[in-house]
Every structure is written in C-alpha cells, then in structure tokens.
Amino acid sequence: MSILLKNANFLDWETLKFKQTDLLVTSGLQGKIQFVQEGFVASKDTTILDCEGMLVTKSFVVGHHHVYSALARGMGTPKKNPENFVEILQYIWWTLDKSLDRDMIEASALSTAIACAKAGSTFVIDHHASPHAVSDSLEIIGKAFDQIGVSHLLCYESSDRDGLTIADEGLAETERYLQKHQGLVGLHASFTVGDRTLENAARLSEKYHSGFHIHVAEDTYDEEFTQKEYGKNIIDRLKETGTLDSSKTILGHCLHLSEKEKELVRQSKVWIAQNPDSNLNNHVGFFDSRNLGNRIMLGTDGMHSNMIRSAQQAFFVGQTFDNIDFLSAYERFRNAHRYLNENNFKGDGENNLVILDYKSPTPVTEDNFLGHFIFGLQAADVRHVISNGELIVKNRRMETINEEDVLTFTKRQALRLWEKMQK
C-alpha cells in the first residue's frame, strides 16, 4: 500500500527548505518517501490526496506525556485544596492514579492516542502510573496506541510512595514489557524512590540496555528532600547509578538544579524534557536552559496532546525566564526525533507526515516559516496525518477507529473514575 500526495508544498523538517512536488509514501517501519515527477502513474491500490495549498512535513513527537491524566478534564474539586506541589500530587494526581483500573487505563490510552494523532503527533513517549492496576498496564496502553496507529515508547513510573510491594510490581511490569517491546525504565522522582528501588531499577536498565525516564527537580521539594534524606543532590544520586551514561535516559523538568548539577547534565548523554504548560499550572517555577546544553526536547506532561502549543508556550514563557528564540524553540520541538534516532527506537521513520491546511493572510516562505510556526500555526491546521506510511487522520477525522464509540467509552470510564476518587 502507498499514498500519493499530489501538489505538495514539502517542508524539510531539518533544513526548512521548501519543495513543490508530488510525494509517494510507502508503508511500514522501513517505509520511505519518494519525490516523483509530474505525470507519475500510481498503482491501483494507491491512496491519492490532493495537497494543493497545504504544507507537508514530518509529523511530531511528544517527548513526555502522561496517559493516566486523560480522564481528568472536568473532574470535581479535590477533597482538600492543595497548598503546594506535594499536595497537588497527593490530593489530585496520586488520588487519580490509585483509582485507575484496566478499563480506565484503556480509555485513557485511546483518548490520548486520538488527541495526539489529531494534533499531528505519530509518536508518544509516555510515563505511566496506576499503582492499584500495575500488571499489564503497559500492554493495555501499547495495544490502544497500536489500534489508533500511533507509535510509542512506554515506561511504568515505579515509586515507593505506595509501599515497596507496589514498587516491586512496577519494576516487574517494566521487565515483562521490555522483554517484548522497546521501552524505558520509569521512576517517579528522587523524593519518592528509595535506594533499594533505585538500585533495582538501575540493574534492570543495565540488563535491557535501556535508560531511565524520571522527573527531576520539578519542584524545590524534590531537591530539598534528596539532600536531607540522602546527603547528596539529585543528579549526583542518579550519576552513581550510571543513569547519566545512557543516551536513552530522559530527565523530565529539571527546573531547580544547581549550577554544579547543570554542568553534570550538560556533559552527560541524557536528554531533558521541558514541559512549560504543566510548570505554569503547578506553580513550580520556570525552565531555564542556560548551562544545560542543547539536548532538550518538549513534552506535554499530560496537560494536553498538542506539541505546537508546547513549543509556542516554551517560547513565550522563555522570553522572561529562558534564553530561547524562534529557532531554538523549533529545535526543541524537533529534538525528540533526534533522541529516537540516536537510540535506534522504531516508529519515527521518514514516512511519518503531517499535512497542514494553514490559511495564512501573509506569505509563508523558507525565510519566515519560523515566524509562522511561533505566531500562526495551530493544531486545528492539521488536515491529514500519516503514521508509518498509513493514513490515520483524513480530513481531521480518525481513519483507524470509530471516534464516537471511543468517546462513549471514555465518558463512561471518566464518570466511574471521578466517583471512585471521591470515596
């Protein structure tokens, strides 16, 4: 099977060069794109899309997501109004994740995958937690994403916050999953992970040649607790496990690192996932890339599934708190591709494309595209999405699943979840 994109205005995601062309897209993890001459005759089973007036470019990657938060939208107020970051976790997110069951996890994964696809992302790096439904949770998420047609790199965020038995279950779930799938070893954050769990996670990471996916210094409490409890900072603690030696490791947030820690991170092989919307929502501070290097990608942290929004938010917030311009905002937006390619993860080949029906009142050129990226483009401009050479979104509607059926299912599970959270 193949797809022919007629009259495409193709934008090379790396060089930002434009090319007017017809584009043939072949399917599969090894699928390619091919520029073809006008008059090319496609085979009978080729899907043809007229892209006149649209931009065609590589689709997007979510560098840090939380499937488990998908059913939170519209839920009632917590039992106690949180007064700090730890209470936000305790009374909102840890209450939610402990209430999840298998059906809720599936509903969360389906709705997240659909939202990502319709916003132009064909690959998601997710960080999951469901302490009372650990077993097979990653398989449930993976199958849901596969059903939608969105590739993935999953992990379970093991943590001691619900006891060592559940922490061990998280690592066991991780190992079962890594035996069959690409993935990472997930941990919540230093302040909820004791030495025993950290050491076991490090051994698991080494055994499967993986890396950590962990929240780091999202709030000052993480750093303060680690210093008090372990007599060292977060990065030194992770360094002792070999975590910083893996280019597969993702450090989420990194808002409150010391200059010494920033230097260690900058000199290491790890990647950082910046999440501007979540940081604003949780009142935890502002990301500052200075002295952290350029191995920075963007995520949504479960706030939404819109990577264009994340990039624009990073730029706007960064005007006061960061050293960021049009190009560096775009580079962070695209760095997740480089992370996946560097580590040979599958599912983000050149046959992953987004077709943007962007109606600008001003010309769009190679010279000014980044201005349109920051000030003009929206997820609503996503018209078609191709994942691994397969058309998964056509004319802004899902091709792989009946979206109305999914919405009926997710709404039912959301009501169950909200009721359970109030008990």
Image (cartoon, rainbow, N blue to C red):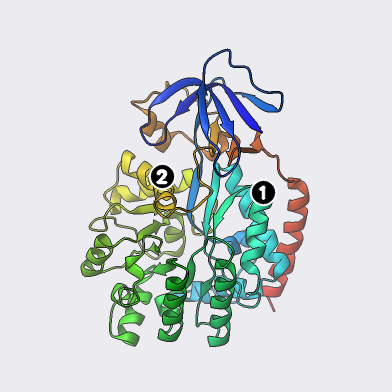
Task: State the residue at coordinates (63%, 74%).
Answer: 134
Q: Are there few (<14), some (14-19), or many (20+) residues within 10 Å of tag 2? A: many
Specify the farthest residue to the top. 39
Give the residue number, with chain letter if any, for mark 2. 334
**Residue 173 is at least partly visible in this image:** yes
Task: Locate residue 274, reporting x and y percent.
Answer: 39, 56
Q: What element carries label 1?
A: helix
Which quadrant of the figure has residue 264?
bottom left
Task: State the residue at coordinates (26%, 60%).
Answer: 266
Towards the viewer: 135 or 105: 135
Give the residue number, with chain letter if any, for mark 1. 148
Q: In this view, does 407 lie to the left or right of 131?
A: right
Q: In this view, does 225 lie to the left or right of 91?
A: left
Quick check: 383 above or below 141? above
Task: State the residue at coordinates (44%, 29%).
Answer: 11
Q: Is residue 232 left or right of residue 299?
A: left
Indicate which disc residue 9 carries.
none
Q: Which amino acid does label 2 sit on?
A: Arg
Classify the position of the N terminus by image quarter: top right
